[in-house]
Image: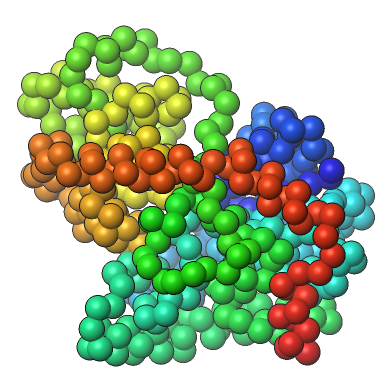
């Protein structure tokens, strides 16, 4: 089978797709990664073919300050979200679609797997099969499906429990719709109409989940706020398969076997320009804990940027998480969804700090499941981290709740779920998407 995989041009969005792609490549399928040139190395190291985005879309969003300089001055809110979606995800949709259409001419794929915040597949979804490949979208962060209680996506609000909360959520949703959802829908519809396609029959966030032939959602149902039965096209796939072991063990690896509890602190691979936001406060917070070793990853920044390290600190730019995660008693993180789900799949409780991007939603889920503590700050003090870490490490309920989630993750293994979904799709004909687009004509 010929398969194309693609994602929004951010490594945190691409990595989950590559995890699935590696499984399919290992099963004997011919897989090509369609992405910006900056990701060629990661894709080819996974054993996949590579095809670059066209020049108008070939960007490196890791350099956000250049591509989106006003992001640091925008007042947080729905209008700022609209600008972010335009700059980061929707503004290059037409160029990304054009490149995908050209790729299909030379690589006639049977299946496209696209992370759900890249919109290049929408013009294809307007076509009838077999005049297009089967299309599967992958949710790399929380399930961005509209909620029955009308809490806007990315708001980080727990389920409404009263009429007053439901009314508040509805007012907030109306604001989001006017300032963010409707303008982004209009941008997408302009592209669709230029290519002879009907308008979206659903808001963009629902469309990316409900229009493809199937939707693979990272995580487990237990991490999602109760919303009743989901459409059968949505399948949870647990934790993203880790990359094969390409990183060596650190020289201090044996230090982690001396009986002390291991705490990992990380700011991920993108939000690490300022290691003083979370890593430095955590090292300071736990420096005097006699039975703790604090491990930190700088996401590629020099270890020396942290200055003099406490005696119980062990630091490296990157570490093999498949080796490290099973050793942990606690993860301290800014809330990247992939890292959080990896930890919870291993039964590791969490202290989370971070309120940007999707991190409000991640924080709400950590709090709601009782698997950790959300601090509620982008830059917590050492005292805030110390209090939260001590509470999680000394309260067995947090580890118990994380262990229950690990059991749930064990029931949603991507090695079994993904092939089953694909095997059911590719020989088939009609799709949910065809019916919904047809209704809009």
The coloring applied to the image is rainbow
Q: Residue at x 32, y 58 (%)?
A: 365
Front residue of 310/30: it is: 30
Front residue of 76/430: it is: 430
In the image, is residue 175 above or below residue 140?
A: below
Image coords of residue 213 (percent x, y): 71, 64
Q: Residue at x 20, y 44 (%)?
A: 398
Q: Residue at x 10, y 37 (%)?
A: 394
Query: How many numbered discs, if any?
Result: 0
Residue 161 visible within the image? yes
Q: Is 349 placed left or right of 129 in the picture?
A: left
Image coords of residue 42 (percent x, y): 63, 35
| Quarter residue 355 falls in | bottom left
Q: Is 187 placed left or right of 262 in the picture?
A: right
Front residue of 347/64: it is: 347
Q: Residue at x 72, y 30 (%)?
A: 26
Q: Is 57 placed left or right of 264 in the picture?
A: right
In the image, is residue 275 above or below residue 233?
A: above
Residue 78 visible within the image? no
Q: Quadrant of the C terminus?
A: bottom right
Image coords of residue 309 (percent x, y): 20, 24
């Amino acid at each position: 089978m010929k398969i194309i995989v693609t994602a929004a041009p951010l490594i945190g969005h691409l990595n989950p797709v590559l995890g699935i792609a590696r499984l399919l490549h290992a099963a004997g399928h011919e897989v090509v990664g369609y992405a910006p040139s900056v990701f060629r190395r990661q894709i080819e190291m996974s054993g996949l073919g590579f095809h670059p985005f066209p020049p108008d879309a070939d960007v490196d969003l890791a350099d956000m300050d250049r591509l989106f300089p006003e992001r640091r001055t925008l007042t947080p809110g729905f209008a700022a979200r609209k600008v972010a979606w335009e700059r980061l995800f929707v503004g290059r949709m037409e160029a990304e679609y054009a490149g995908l259409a050209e790729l299909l001419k030379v690589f006639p794929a049977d299946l496209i797997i696209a992370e759900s915040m890249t919109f290049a597949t929408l013009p294809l979804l307007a076509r009838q099969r077999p005049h297009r490949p089967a299309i599967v979208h992958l949710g790399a962060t929380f399930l961005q499906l509209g909620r029955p209680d009308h809490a806007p996506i990315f708001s980080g609000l727990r389920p409404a429990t009263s009429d007053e909360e439901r009314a508040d959520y509805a007012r907030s949703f109306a604001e989001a719709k006017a300032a963010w959802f409707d303008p982004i829908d209009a941008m997408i519809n302009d592209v669709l109409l230029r290519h002879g396609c009907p308008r979206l029959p659903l808001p963009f966030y629902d469309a990316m989940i409900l229009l493809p032939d199937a939707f693979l959602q990272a995580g487990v149902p237990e991490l999602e706020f109760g919303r009743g039965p989901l459409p059968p096209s949505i399948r949870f796939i647990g934790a993203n398969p880790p990359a094969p072991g390409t990183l060596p063990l650190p020289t201090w690896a044996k230090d982690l076997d001396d009986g002390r509890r291991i705490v990992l602190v990380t700011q991920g691979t993108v939000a690490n320009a300022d290691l003083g936001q979370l890593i430095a406060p955590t090292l300071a917070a736990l420096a005097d804990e006699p039975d703790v070793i604090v491990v930190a990853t700088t996401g590629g920044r020099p270890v020396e940027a942290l200055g003099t390290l406490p005696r119980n600190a062990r630091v490296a730019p990157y570490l093999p998480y498949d080796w490290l995660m099973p050793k942990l008693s606690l993860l301290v993180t800014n809330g990247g969804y992939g890292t959080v789900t990896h930890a919870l799949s291993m039964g590791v409780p969490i202290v989370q700090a971070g309120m940007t991007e999707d991190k409000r939603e991640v924080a709400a889920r950590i709090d709601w499941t009782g698997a950790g503590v959300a601090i509620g700050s982008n830059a917590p003090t050492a005292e805030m981290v110390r209090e939260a870490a001590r509470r999680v490490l000394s309260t067995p309920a947090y580890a118990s709740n994380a262990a229950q989630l690990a059991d749930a993750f064990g029931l949603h293994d991507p090695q079994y779920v993904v092939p089953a979904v694909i095997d059911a799709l590719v020989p088939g004909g009609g799709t949910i998407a065809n019916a919904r687009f047809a209704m809009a004509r």
